[in-house]
Image (cartoon, rainbow, N blue to C red):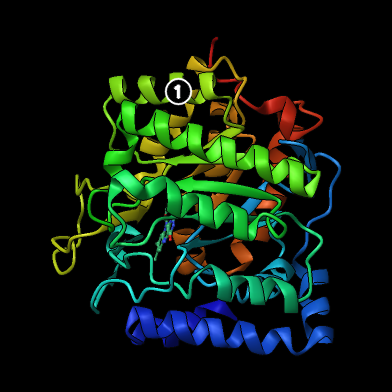
Amino acid sequence: MYPIMKKILFRMDPEVAHEWTIRSLQLLQQMPFLAKSIQQKWEVRHPSLSSQVAQHSFPNPVGLAAGFDKHANVYPALAHLGFGFVEVGTLTPRPQSGNARPRLFRLPEDQAIINRMGFNNHGVEDAVHSFQTLPRPTIPIGINLGKNKDTPNEQASQDYTIGLQTLYPYGDYFVINISSPNTQGLRDLQEAKALEKLLTDILQTRDRCIQSHQVKKPIFLKIAPDLTEEQLIEIMEIVLHTKMDGMIATNTTLSREGLLNQVSSHETGGLSGRPLTSRSTRWIAEIYRFTQGKVPIIGVGGIFTAEDAYAKIRAGASLVQVYTGMIYQGPAVVKQINQGLVKLLKRDGFASVQDAVGVDVSI
Ligand SMILES: Cc1cc2nc3c(=O)[nH]c(=O)nc-3n(C[C@H](O)[C@H](O)[C@H](O)COP(=O)(O)O)c2cc1C
């Protein structure tokens, strides 16, 4: 059915198509019978797919990346599409409208998207309301946190702290997003001194949350693919020494290398999809090698097929996420990837995803 829907959606302005999709998912949330039957059709249950990562059980390793459910209001519907986990956000303390439209562009020849959304979201209080009123899915829900556009970098840790404290009861894991290219200066927080301070503050806040809620929730750091090797090493040293729980590699890229599309490739913003596939897999392998497999990695960037997901797992990712692949191939991509992974694991003699993590990397 998606080829027909895609024809309709791809005739619309990309952001209108997204809003239309979100409204359809909200409708689905009001039809639990339909949602259940979709889940039964699309969910792939197989013992080789389930795993334990950062103290959570994942029924399969394929998650939805941040930026789709920006306001955390359709994650229950998304949980019915066969994902092993869903990440919501990026959420900022105060609501903000993001950059001026148009800010989302399709590059079909490249199977890619450029976005400069700029953390448009309804803010953390609105998300609390969603979490308190919507049904809780059985899969893990990650919450991706950012800072407001008008918060100076020197005060960034306050914004992440507010996000973490306010949403702590509702996320199964949290993500510190300092790698979006669409909030001016945000990526400067990846610089060693700023990052060390930021993560130290955030982990102190987490300690206070553990005291008050009696539960430790893992925190991942999401990085950009446009770092130099030296920058990546500095970041990993800080991640190891501050004892962050994991990393997400990667966010969108500023690179425009090798694009075929002539219409939108000049647009500013982050590029995602096929052009990012091998770049993000390389970063995953680098992180896995440097951290000697001690830091769980969520691999994201240009996953369209089971082979793409498997390459990231073999490079060191314990879990993977998709976004652009779902725009081009529809939600059935999740089932295709999971079914394909079962076959690839079996072909190579692995009893589980966990057994295949990092096998292509010598440490
Ligand atoms: C339209 C759009 C919006 C996004 N918004 C966010 C966001 O708010 N926070 C974030 O961490 N990543 C965001 N991302 C990045 C994705 O989570 C992902 O890291 C990136 O797109 C690479 O994966 P993909 O090639 O499968 O799309 C966004 C991506 C797209 C395409």
Instruction: Tell me which residue sits at (53%, 17%) in the image.
Output: 291
Whereabouts is ligand 1, in terms of quadrant? bottom left
Outermost residue toward the top in this view: 363
User: Could you tell me if residue 65 is visible in this image?
Assistant: no
Mark 1: C-beta under 8 Å from nearest atom of ligand 1: no
How many discs mark residues in the rendered view? Answer: 1
* Residue wearing tag 1: 238
Depth check: 257 or 248 in front?
Answer: 248
> How far across and how far down the image is residue 168, in percent?
67, 54
81 vs 64, left or right, is: right
Quadrant in the rendering for residue 84: bottom right
Between 26 and 37, which is closer to the camera in this rendering? Answer: 26
For residue 148, say whether it is visible: yes
Residue appearing at x 83%, y 70% in the figure:
40
Taking the spot 56% from the left edge, 87% from the top edge, the residue there is: 23
Vertical relation: 187 (above or below) 71? above
Q: Is residue 22 left or right of residue 324?
A: right
Q: Secondary structure at mark 1?
A: helix
Q: Amino acid at mark 1?
A: Ile
The C terminus: image quadrant: top right
Tell me: residue 80, above or below residue 317.
Answer: below
Q: Position of residue 268 (x, y in %)?
A: 18, 60
Quadrant in which the N terminus is drawn: bottom right
Identity of the residue drawn at 59% across and 28% down: 314
* Residue 248 horizontal/vertical position (percent): 51, 40
User: How far across and down, in percent of the image, does residue 250 sit?
Assistant: 43, 42
Hey, which quadrant is residue 39 in on the image?
bottom right
Category of crowding for the residue at label 1, using alpha-carbon neighbours closer than 10 angstroms: few (below 14), some (14–19), many (at least 20): some
Q: Is residue 252 above or below residue 347?
A: below
Relative height, residue 231 to residue 267 (above, below)? above
